[in-house]
């Protein structure tokens, strides 16, 4: 099974466990980009949610936990972060992510429900973060190459 197929198989397992829950979550990062047509190779699966959602996702997927969800802070980003391994694929849980702004203050966590879009991939309905949001989020994180890649992709569709 190639890497992308392995990601989709892991995503099906995750979706199966989270479907029907009240958790507000969305895919972000490389797999989300690929599912929305951006020409990237997925590296892992990133699930973005709020703080309560991060701990709830951990409970729903407890048998896959490799790093329990806990508040984690670095110089430029902080969140309720945990990690899973589902079918050999690394999965990051990211709750209430905050990005440090140039003035040293912290950006408020995003409203996932507001920025979430729904797509159908591999026969399942999946939540993804809007690419317009992702461009700005990646800029704030200083990941300018990824931000430009997504911005260029959006420009092609205009």
Image (spheres, grey):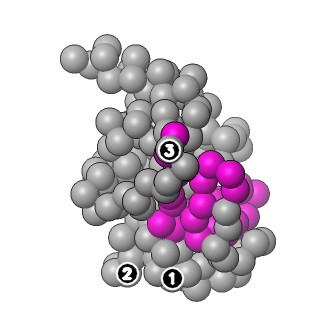
Q: How would you classify the magenta stretch by its main secondary structure?
A: strand
Crowding at label 3, few (<14), some or many (≥20) Cα neighbours within 10 Å? few
Can I make out residue 5 in this image? yes
**Quadrant position of the C terminus in the picture:** top left
Q: Is residue 154 above or below residue 121?
A: above
Residue 81, horizontal then vertical, whole percent:
63, 67
Crowding at label 1, few (<14), some or many (≥20) Cα neighbours within 10 Å? some
Residue drawn at 52 percent across, 40 percent down = 102
Q: Is residue 116 above or below residue 157?
A: below
Residue drawn at 46 percent across, 81 percent down = 52
Residue 137, horizontal then vertical, whole percent:
45, 42
Residue 50, horizontal then vertical, whole percent:
44, 70
Q: Are marks 2 and 1 in contact (CB under 8 Å)?
A: yes
> Disc 2 designates what residue?
21
> Disc 1 designates what residue?
56
Measure the alpha-carbon separation of dots 1 and 3: 33 Å
- What's the magenta region? 74-102
Q: Nearer the viewer, residue 15 or 79?
A: 79
Residue 24, horizontal then vertical, whole percent:
36, 70
**Which mark sits nearer the N-terminus, 1 or 3?**
1
Tell me, yes or no, whether the highlighted magenta stretch contains residue 105. Answer: no
> Disc 3 designates what residue?
103
**Which mark sits nearer the N-terminus, 2 or 3?**
2
Q: Nearer the viewer, mark 2 or mark 1?
A: 1
Q: Nearer the viewer, mark 2 or mark 3?
A: 3
């Amino acid at each position: 099974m190639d890497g992308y197929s392995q990601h989709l198989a892991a995503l099906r397992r995750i979706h199966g466990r989270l479907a029907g829950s009240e958790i507000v979550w969305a895919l972000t990062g490389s797999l989300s980009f690929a599912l929305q047509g951006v020409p990237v190779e997925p590296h892992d699966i990133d699930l973005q949610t709020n703080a309560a959602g991060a701990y709830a996702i951990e409970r729903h997927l407890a048998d896959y936990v490799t790093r329990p969800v806990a508040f984690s802070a670095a110089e430029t980003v902080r969140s309720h972060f945990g990690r899973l391994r589902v079918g050999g694929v690394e999965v990051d849980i990211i709750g209430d992510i905050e990005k440090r702004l140039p003035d040293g203050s912290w950006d408020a966590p995003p409203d996932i429900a507001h920025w979430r879009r729904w797509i159908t991939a591999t026969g399942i309905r999946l939540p993804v973060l809007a690419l317009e949001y992702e461009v700005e989020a990646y800029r704030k994180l200083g990941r300018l190459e990824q931000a430009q890649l997504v911005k260029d992709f959006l420009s092609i569709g205009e």
